[in-house]
Amino acid sequence: MENYLNTKVAKIINSVRPEISFNQDIDTELFGVLDSLDIILIVEELEKQFDISINANQIVPENFASLYTLEDFVKSLAR
Amino acid sequence: MIFQFHGARIHGIQLILPNHEISFDNEVNNYDFSPQQSAKLKVVMGFDRRRVVAEGVTCSDLVVAGFEALSRDGLLDLKSLDALIVVTQTPDYPIPGTSYVIHGRLGMRQDMLCLDINQGCAGFVVGLMTAFSLLNQAHIKRVALVNADVVSRLVAMGDRNSRPIIGDAASITIVDATSDDSLIHGNINVDGTGWNALMVPAGGMRIRPSPQTSILKVDANGNSRALDNLLMRGDAVFNFVMKEVPPMIQSLLEASGMKLTQVDGFAFHQPNPFMLRKLAEKIGVPRHKMPMDLVRNFGNSSGVSIPAVLCTSFSASYFQQPRVMCLAGFGVGLTWGSLLMKMHELSFLNIVEI
């Protein structure tokens, strides 16, 4: 489940920003890399692919700071 | 701040659209979006088609054409107007106000009031509140509220955040005094500390326009713009809207004693479909009651967006029976305002293209 989620979130980010590369076992910084349009597109895909609803209050830099923080955030909603 | 008005009604609304349409597909090379991003942005953000004026066309050009069409079609006698309010951020000239230019070009009556208001996305709400207040005067029976903006002329070609959504338009809303005493509820709020979230840095008295102010610079997100261009800090605006608009609607409903389910339609300012979807979810408005596709079809026309939604997503026949409408505008200032009012038997709800 962990790996599946990891792959899926990374793939969603790559579907919006293909040039971002993710390394095994190392977190990838997203803060300052994703702009507001990227975040909107990623939110839309996360909602669709994980069947979750992301509240407007949750679209904040803390949740999109890195791959790991975004995964944790998605996990908390997907439970 | 809470307001209450009575003795006023909307008589009719005319939307004026430039007939020149720009497609996102045709200008996508101006931006550095990947093909996948472009395809997604079309769906999620409504980057698709927008109406813009030709070079040199001003707000008064759109508005004069709109008034002439109303007059020609027998829908409005210009001599019946007691006041003209023009709400714009893109006036024809720094001096005088655009209301005087329109007044002069149409040969309007001399014994009337002309008033200019510099407002953007909340401009329809602010303008209507001003019109309702003027109608308390014994000699003011009819007010023409004009909302007009040609912001496309201020947006840089390489501004990937703003340019794909910005459209131009004007509207003429005729507001009449009425013996119907039903209450209109409103509220307005301002946070001037956010004045620089949406702005054009140069062109006023603080920074005069010069060759230097037209030099393009690229920001961290790849937006290319000059000091002469519109600057929108998208993150700040999004956060402000999500924080302030839902409680504003809640307090409006509380002040009116109405429930959300009693509202027939929500005509909100149209920043983009994503933001509207998130707003609707947070407020609890069913999607079918809140149109969200103005940006996709015509572009975000700032203060004109609410009357544009009324003209493009509703119909005169819809208002043959009284409808409780919630109107909300939010943006430059920062300002957020809303109105809850019955709309009924509009004499016209038209679109003209020029």
Image (tube, grey):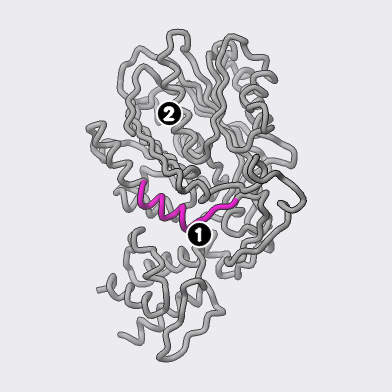
Q: Tag on residue B43?
A: 1
**x and y percentages locating residue B240 in the rendered image:** 41, 51
> Is B240 colored magenta in this rendering?
yes
Q: Is disc 1 placed on a helix, strand or loop?
A: helix
Q: Residues within 10 Å of mark 1 (few under 14, many from 20)?
A: some
Residue matched to label 2: B317
Mark 1 or mark 2: name the one nearer the start of the chain. 1
Give the residue type that dot 1 points to.
Val
> Is B151 colored magenta in this rendering?
no
Host chain of mark 1: B
| Residue A22 appears left or right of B180 | right
Question: Mainly helix, strand or loop, the magenta region?
Answer: helix
Q: Is disc 2 placed on a helix, strand or loop?
A: helix
Q: Residue furthest bottom?
A: A24
**x and y percentages locating residue A14 in the rendered image:** 50, 77
Q: Tag on residue A64?
A: none
Give, as a single range, the part of the protein colored magenta.
B231-244
Residue in front for this viewpoint, B240 or B51: B240
Q: Image quadrant for the C terminus of chain A?
A: bottom left
**x and y percentages locating residue A1 in the rendered image:** 30, 85
